[in-house]
Amino acid sequence: MSLNLYLSELNKSDAIDTQGAFTGHTTDGLSDTNANLYYQAPLADWQRIFKFYTDGGADITDEGVTLFTEEARDIIGDTSAASDSYSVGSLYAANAATSATYSVNVVNDISAGLGNTTDPAAALDFTKELARAVFGSTESVDMFTNESTIATSYGTAIETCATAIATEFASTSSKTIYASISSGANLLTVKRIYDQLRYTALTRFTMGYGATVSAGTPADSTNNDLTTDGSGTGATVDLLMTNSTIDSIVVYTTGSGYVKGDTITITTSAGNSVEISSLTDVQANMLNGTLDHSDGTELPLLADDVFHIQLTVTSNASQTDAAGNSLDTIGDTVSRTADLTIKLVA
Amino acid sequence: MSLPSVNYNVIQTGTISLNNIQSAFQFYNTSGESEWNITGLSKGQTQFTNTNGLNQNDNTSHNFIRQLAQKIFGSMDADDFFDNSVALSNNWETQITNILTSLNGTTANGDASKELIDKMISDQSERFYITYNASVSGATAGTYTGLTATGSSSSATCTVSTVITSSTEIQSIAVSATNGTFTVNENVTITNGGGSGVNISISNINSVQTALLNGTLNSSSSPTNAPLEVGDKIKLHYTINCHDDQVSASNNDVSMSQTFFVEYTIV
């Protein structure tokens, strides 16, 4: 009979010298723009666009997650994502100062000072700068005979920019690992959002995000059952606590059927509990064990997240100055930038 | 001892040569005791080597990263959230090398040898008797004394007695007078000097049988190797911890240990 022996006296243990790193990358803020525009996007519209998945342990490289974007004609605009066509007509609106800064599916150009719709700040900025180029002074705006048409045309240009943005997401992108993304506005965008989320909101990628103690004082415990107001079943989690502070929640057993927005309650054997009132898609997929499925997991965008896009409007190619010189020819093309601030609202 | 629990259940496998390992575990019988009592010697230098799978690219390394991801983010599938998986796996392999160095260099005490011998006495007691691998044919049942045991290659001899219960069954062989020059792995024959009834063969005597025939089982200066054999398996328990300063995504201190077995088959 052969020997098969565990030699406990030779147990060996060592700690690795390297810490796991997960820093993310920040991006420079938008600065030195000439005007501001405001847009309110439905949170769900944006959440469904930007996705990732992990490789599920297939290799050990620093390639990061695989990122992709869904077809999203509604990233900015008022059309359905399922539609093959999109329209940004009436997207731009010259708003009075008393209007809400953000309106759903409307690019608001807030009044510069008169408090009415006759002086949308961004359009007025452009018109004034055009007056400077044509007449030599920004105060010469009233010398245009079509001042209001110029403002309208500015809005049309903004809508055209919005169309161009929507076009970048006209179809589902390729699924590309993080380290290989170097081109494609849609892929570069999802990469930038992923980087910034990891840099400033890393905990959104954790199972414990948004968890609160809902009953008693839970202690460290393992394999705790979950209850949910949804239809998910089977998952259990470990709780790591310091007094009443939740240090970590770790999936112990994966289940199925959990979805974004579910409320889950984790109850320890002592009857104490922790609640997550609204699962992110990341948390739902962690509980389901599907973070590595190529269907993708939504990046954890949340209400009140804000994005900035720079829009540039230039003067008409045939625009001349008061002396009849082409602005483009004499090197005085008017180019004005607007910071389109997009706020996600649930 | 029962096996401890591990959190990576895939047993890593490797091989180690018989010559290499058996001399690393030595013992001697503590004389003057009424009961069987052994002293294990410091484990000798051994060449446990890295197994086929234990490198930075294998599943065990990746499991470490996945377990670390579970601690930090809450899910093992979050492994790709790390920026430095390659550095982690590289360093994991470095720690495996360090463990092997420590393992092979461990000579501090005799507990490992004692643990091995104790377990073998319990489960492979037959290897500790002279009758191990002995056969007899055409014998007449009875008790025989003053027999001569002779080594096939050393030509060493000693005097033994034996109890034979049937023509093919040996109940016991006991050394009456030792000589001291039998060598491991030789064959030994035991006859009654031309008389009828006894013709015992012992093939490939092991280290313990050799010591018994030589009368050196009590020798602390010439200890006996563990009677390990080809096909025996030695299971070792490895623990790889995360860095002491590892923090979670919430900047809390994190402790994580990956535990698994490495099983060496003796060849």
Image (cartoon, coloured by chain):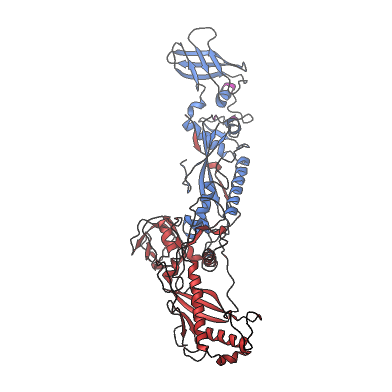
Chain colours: A red, B blue
Residue A193 in view = yes
Q: Is residue B222 magenta?
A: yes
Q: Which residue, as the protein is rendered here, is positioned at the far right?
A: A330
The one of B209 and A163 positioned closer to us in this rendering: A163
Residue B188 location (% of width, % of height) = 56, 17
Q: Is residue B71 magenta?
A: no
Q: Position of residue B172 (x, y in %)?
A: 48, 20
Q: Residue at x 66, y 80 (%)?
A: A331
Please identify the quarter of the rendering in which residue A287 is found: bottom left
Quadrant placement of the C terminus of chain B:
top right
Residue B72 seen in this snapshot: no
Q: Position of residue A26 (x, y in %)?
A: 57, 68
Vertical order, B218 against B261 (above or below):
above
Residue placed at 48% from the left, 70% from the top? Answer: A166
Q: Above or below — where is B15 with respect to B56?
A: above
Q: Which residues are magenta?
A: B213-228
Task: Please name whichever residue, B30 or A120, is drawn nearer the observer in this view of the structure.
Answer: A120
Please tell me whether the stretch drawn in magenta is mainly helix, strand or loop.
Answer: loop
Residue A282 at x, y = what percent? 44, 62
